Image (spheres, rainbow, N blue to C red):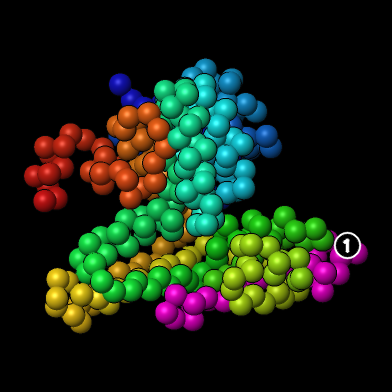
Amino acid sequence: MKIKVAVVGYGNVGRFAVQAVKSAPDMELCGIVETFNVPDAPDKVPVVKSIDELGKPDIAILCLPSRNVEEQAIPCLEKGISTVDSYDIHSGIFELKCSLDKAAKKGNARSVLSAGWDPGSDSIVRTLLEACAPKGITYTNFGPGMSMGHSVVAKAIKGVENAISMTIPGGAGIHSRMVYVQLAPGANIEEVSAAIKADPYFAHDETHVIQVENTDVYLDTGHGVSMERRGTSGITSNQNFAFSMRINNPALTSQIMVSSARAALRQVPGAYTLVEIPVIDLLPGDRESIIKRLV
């Protein structure tokens, strides 16, 4: 029997999530939950305002801004609908895990949180690199590319009509942010700039806010990461590891969420980050075939 999946939110990530679910051999898209009109929804896929209109899907993929995840996930979990999200505020992950774990156990459901590519799949890579060299340091360098989370936050600032935040890697895990903003009528660029730089998403990085007439010309969903660990295996030093990728940001985020939805239903009730889940659970098919193919 196929996994019944609801996609909540139909923005950049939601659109790709719908494609990924429809491409999954073990999943069935039972509906899209969106408060706005969805003129480009796939044929015969219900578009509803509330997940309650879909009956009881097995799992909801929450394609929402990070700051909206908790308020949307808890009601689903308490009703027995498992959830996956791509919450990306690193400092708030453990607190969110505790909150969703309580709701999931109450509803006999599962939650996989922070299941994007960072946090998410990159977290798995960092964990593996540390297992390879327990003593050392890992540098994670993002970009260059557009950060969806930072762009959403910048768009929400008062006086901003539209915004795109680009991540510029400086090396050794240090980044700067280039935020291109299209102002609403009457807005002041100095006030908008100060508000963006004060937000926790931007406060810890060098941030440049640039006013532009039209942000569409800066739109680029490409992104990437380069990770390097230098450390010691046992007592042997000078162990160097590298991992890199260049990707379409929303496409990869949604694919990891869809794979995590499969893995979620293979766990006991509760909330999980990706480093707590066996990676084999992310893949469709039986374990014996996967082991023979990949090990």
Residue at left offset 16%, top offset 37%: 287
Residue at left offset 42%, top offset 48%: 115
From this viewpoint, which residue is outermost toward the left? Answer: 292
Where residue 4 sits in the image (x, y, percent)?
Answer: 41, 26
Q: Nearer the viewer, residue 262 or 82?
A: 82
Q: Which residues are magenta?
A: 168-192
Q: Nearer the viewer, residue 197 or 160?
A: 197
Quarter of the rendering containing residue 119: bottom left
Q: Is residue 15 above or below residue 147?
A: above
Where residue 21 sits in the image (x, y, percent)?
Answer: 41, 37
Q: Nearer the viewer, residue 8 or 12?
A: 8
Q: Which residue is mark 1?
A: 185
Q: Amino acid at mark 1?
A: Pro
Q: Nearer the viewer, residue 87 or 216?
A: 87
Q: Is residue 252 above or below residue 85?
A: below
For label 1, the SS is loop
Quadrant for the N terminus in the image: top left
Q: Is residue 64 visible?
A: yes
Circle 1 crowding by C-alpha within 10 Å: few under 14, some 14–19, many from 20: few
From this viewpoint, which residue is outermost toward the front? Answer: 235
Q: Is residue 140 above or below residue 33?
A: below
Where residue 278 sits in the image (x, y, percent)?
Answer: 25, 44
Where residue 105 sits in the image (x, y, percent)?
Answer: 43, 27
Quarter of the rendering containing residue 75: top right
Q: Is residue 254 visible?
A: no
